[in-house]
Image (cartoon, rainbow, N blue to C red):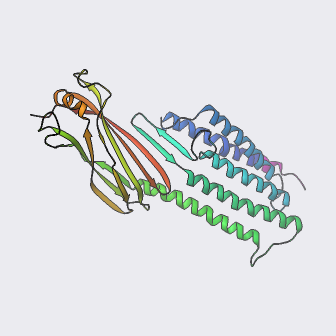
Amino acid sequence: MAIQITKMIGYGILNGILYIALPLILFEVISIMGLMTFTLEFKTSIIIIGIIGTAFSMARHAYPKDTSANRIIAFGSTVYSGIYMFYLFGGFTPGVQLGTYMISTPLLQVLLGLQIIAWLLLASSGIRALQYLIEAIELRKNKEYRVKFKLSKIFKVIGTLFSLFIFGYLGSIVYSGMNLGFNFHPGIVLGSQFGTLPDPNGYNNITLTFDLNNQGFYAIYNVSIDAELYTVTSTNEPLLPVGVIVAESVDNYFGTFHSFTNNINNDITLFFDPTHIVGLNTTVATLALKISFSTLYAAIFINLILTVGGIPWAPPPP
């Protein structure tokens, strides 16, 4: 049985690009964009895992496809690629919850729980690996294992359908995400409650109003939104210090925003901290609004933290 040197080299180069070069290029682009940083240890592990995966691919294509040696190595290579993808989506990252990634910019932080994707890719590799193992046994013993159909063919069909399902699922997430709209109404509404402040006619809360337009395939479940307002600058720091939270929301749980719906005029109420009421009633300041949005979308956990700065504050009129 002749060794296929040309195929080994060709597939080695191709898999070297897919396993090593492409991930490292993507990591670098994402880092340059300031969306996410990757540790040197993580990059080194990707290189090591990629080299092993490339070696598996070269060994697999050293033998013709219709030989048991090819199918046995294909079994090991497929199991290994499944573990690789599982690791790539956070499966084995030390000290980090399974499948958890964070995207961070000065104004935005997004925590993504990609566990479902990691498990789907691992399961898909497992199904394809079983196909190759059965084919190796069939070729080695020159015998077909049949139920009503050839057993290896059944696993091949299942594996193909499962792969199509995964691609369809990921594509639907991208499409649905592009059809989400989140918009805050301009301005804020000051509310008052008599007798609770040093000034009985003073304001004790702020109401923010937002719209969420969900025209995607998936409902947005367990929506929880918290907000806090804090000082960035102050013309009278002894009375109104910089960096203190002057107002925050409590228990803003919105439940579910169903697919293909436009949910308008949702309110978030932030209550002023009584210890800063006097300072707010007498001091010109600049504020920042920090919003934390958590939800479960298409089986992916999302926690988004958005900071909007440069909000001018002037004492309310008497």
Residue 13 to residue 127: above or below: above
Point out residue 57 in the picture as x, y percentages from the top left corner: 76, 49
Q: Quadrant of the N terminus?
A: bottom right
Report the magenta residues as a range.
Answer: 1-8
Residue 144 to residue 125: above or below: below
Q: Quadrant of the C terminus?
A: top left
Identity of the residue drawn at 26% across and 35% down:
273
Residue 161 to residue 63: above or below: below
Residue 35 part of the magenta segment: no
Q: Quadrant of residue 194?
A: top left
Identity of the residue drawn at 71% across and 71% down:
154
Nearest to the observer: residue 132 or residue 112:
112
Nearest to the observer: residue 245 or residue 196:
196
Nearest to the observer: residue 304 or residue 15:
304
Residue 258 to residue 117: above or below: below
> Residue extending furthest left?
318
In this rendering, position of residue 128 left or right of residue 265:
right
Point out residue 53 in the picture as x, y percentages from the top left corner: 73, 46
In this rendering, position of residue 106 left or right of residue 58:
left
Identity of the residue drawn at 74% across and 64% down:
131
Identity of the residue drawn at 44% across and 35% down:
105
Point out residue 235 in the picture as x, y percentages from the top left corner: 22, 22
> Residue extending furthest front?
195
Point out residue 113 in the picture as x, y percentages from the top left corner: 52, 48
Nearest to the observer: residue 61 or residue 150:
150
Residue 3 part of the magenta segment: yes
Label total for image: 0
> Residue extending furthest bottom?
148
